[in-house]
Image (spheres, rainbow, N blue to C red):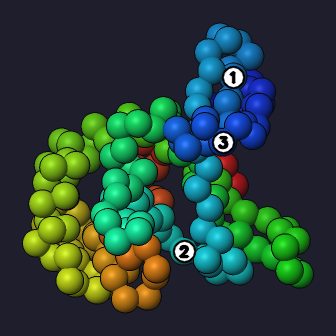
Amino acid sequence: MYLKHSTFERIAEKKQQLQGIDMIFTDKRTGISYSVDEKAQLDYVNETLPTFAFELIYEKRGGQKQGWLFDTAKKTQFYALVTNIFSDEKDVFTSCNITFVNREKLLAHLSTLGLTKKFLGELTLVHKNLHGKLELKELNPKKEGYLYFSTQNKAEKPINLILRLDYLVRIGVAKRLI
């Protein structure tokens, strides 16, 4: 997907946003539209991280909820991962990087590694009291990714699959716009 051949429409309707659609990109050449969910590292403004957190599970009102990565109710086709967000003054952003991730290709790749919704769900249950990093034998933790349990420092206590952005590009599921 090249942006010079695309138009986009920002989605304001709450129902569509809850379905994982923040914008619709349409290829001007083919007329095909794609639903895009924007994900931004707003907790890390003025920092450069080589990774992105894909939400598996989080807590809400005392119960565990399905994170957005494996949520079958989401109609997301692409994630627009906004990283390296820089700001010179409060609420004035001066630059960022965007990495587009094809959700279907990402889920298929994870499945070939055995990192399915079922497997990761069972793994998170076994380690539910862990706080911090959990290395997976299926991923090189320095070059590809790992699990991270935020059970003590965030209200929603998310459990995330942390993946390196260059890994996503290398395996062909993502393209960077810098």
Measured from the top left, where is residue 171 in percent x and y? 36, 46
Q: CA distance from mark 1 to mark 3?
A: 21 Å
- In the image, taking residue 142 as reference, residue 21 lies left or right, namely right
* Mark number, residue 49: 2
> Which residue corresponds to mark 1?
26
Q: Is residue 134 above or below residue 172?
A: below
Single out the mark in the foreground, 1 or 3: 3
- Circles 2 and 1: CB distance less than 8 Å? no
| Residue 128 found in image quarter | bottom left
Give whichever of discs 1 and 3 has the lower sequence position: 3
User: Which element is circle 3 on?
Assistant: helix
Residue 34 rendering spot, x and y as whole percentages: 59, 27
Residue underneath mark 3: 14
For the point 47% across and 64% down, the residue is 52
* Mark 3 to mark 2 CA distance (whole Å): 30 Å
Residue type, numbered disc 2: Leu
Position of the N terminus, as image quadrant, is: top right
For the residues marked 2 and 1, what is the alpha-carbon distance in whole angstroms? 30 Å
Residue 23, relative to residue 124: is it above or below? above
User: Label 3 amino acid?
Assistant: Lys
**In terms of sequence position, does the residue under pointer 2 or pointer 1 come before the other?**
1
Give the image location of residue 29, x and y in percent: 70, 12
Q: What residue is rendered at 76% in x and 74% in y?
A: 86
Label 1: element kind: strand
From the viewer's side, name the closer residue of 42 and 110: 42
Residue 137 in the image: x percent, y percent?
13, 66
